[in-house]
Image (tube, rainbow, N blue to C red):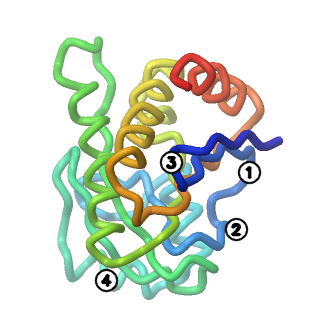
């Protein structure tokens, strides 16, 4: 399954799949603040990318919620991994939306600053961090659309979604926004 929309000259795409197989310039890791590896997407990226990613994460030391840092892609097809920390969802009144938007925006800014042309995101904060997928999808997609409207340097933003349920929710939210 795949969905694509054009934003100016750029492409925003949704695919169901495994982010560790992506060949975009960078993939985004839904990291924890200690950059210590973990479950879900974080663990999968570290397993597939090999020890070089963790070595660089240890040197960096950590990353605050809503911010992003970059490391090598190690053994991945992607040259870089951008590690961002999404918020743990409590009840939606603790600034979670602002932090989730910031996690996406800071990842995009970091990619642009490095001259990267393509980036793949997972559904940040929707796993063990408990963010409702529809709300997270709306924030992630709106942030990506806004970014592409203002930054012609980014040619492709892809959301690589694990499972058809998450893909379907992102697809519905994208229809509402475009």
Mark linked to residue 17 = 1
Q: Residue 146's x, y, as percent?
A: 36, 39
Q: Are marks 4 and 1 in contact (CB under 8 Å)?
A: no
Residue at the right extreme? 1
Q: Earlier in the sequence, mark 3 or mark 4?
A: 3
Q: Nearer the viewer, mark 3 or mark 4?
A: 3
Q: Earlier in the sequence, mark 4 or mark 1?
A: 1
In this rendering, would 26 be left or right of 83? right
Task: Describe the element under mark 3 as helix, strand or loop.
Answer: loop
Whole-number angstrom distance, CA of label 4 to CA of label 2: 21 Å
Whole-number angstrom distance, CA of label 1 to CA of label 2: 8 Å
Whole-number angstrom distance, CA of label 4 to CA of label 1: 26 Å
Q: Nearer the viewer, mark 4 or mark 1?
A: 1
Mark linked to residue 8 = 3
Q: Residue 33's x, y, as percent?
A: 24, 54
Residue, x 67% and y 27% (percent of image)?
171
Residue that label 2 marks: 21
Q: Residue 2's x, y, as percent?
A: 77, 43
Residue, x 51% and y 22% (percent of image)?
177
Q: Earlier in the sequence, mark 3 or mark 2?
A: 3
Whole-number angstrom distance, CA of label 3 to CA of label 4: 35 Å
Q: Are marks 1 and 2 in contact (CB under 8 Å)?
A: yes
Residue that label 4 marks: 56
Q: Are marks 3 and 1 in contact (CB under 8 Å)?
A: no
10 Å neighbourhood of mark 1: few (<14), some, or many (≥20)? some
Q: Nearer the viewer, mark 4 or mark 2?
A: 2
- Establish if 89 lies above or below 122: above
10 Å neighbourhood of mark 4: few (<14), some, or many (≥20)? some
Q: Residue 88's x, y, as percent?
A: 31, 31
Q: Nearer the viewer, mark 3 or mark 2?
A: 3
């Amino acid at each position: 399954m795949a969905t694509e929309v054009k934003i100016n000259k750029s492409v925003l795409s949704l695919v169901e799949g495994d982010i560790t197989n992506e060949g975009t310039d960078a993939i985004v890791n839904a990291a924890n603040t200690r950059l210590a590896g973990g479950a879900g997407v974080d663990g999968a990226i570290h397993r597939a990318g090999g020890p070089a990613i963790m070595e660089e994460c240890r040197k960096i030391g950590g990353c605050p919620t809503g911010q992003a840092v970059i490391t090598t892609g190690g053994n991945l097809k992607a040259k870089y991994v951008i590690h961002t920390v999404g918020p743990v969802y409590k009840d939606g009144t603790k600034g979670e939306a602002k932090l989730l938007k910031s996690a996406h925006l800071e990842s995009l800014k970091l990619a642009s600053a490095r001259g990267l042309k393509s980036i793949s995101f997972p559904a940040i904060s929707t796993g063990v961090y408990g963010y409702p997928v529809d709300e997270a999808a709306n924030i992630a997609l709106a942030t990506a659309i806004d970014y592409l409207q203002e930054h012609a340097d980014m040619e492709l933003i892809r959301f690589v979604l694990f499972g058809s349920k998450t893909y379907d929710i992102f697809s519905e939210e994208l229809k509402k926004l475009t």
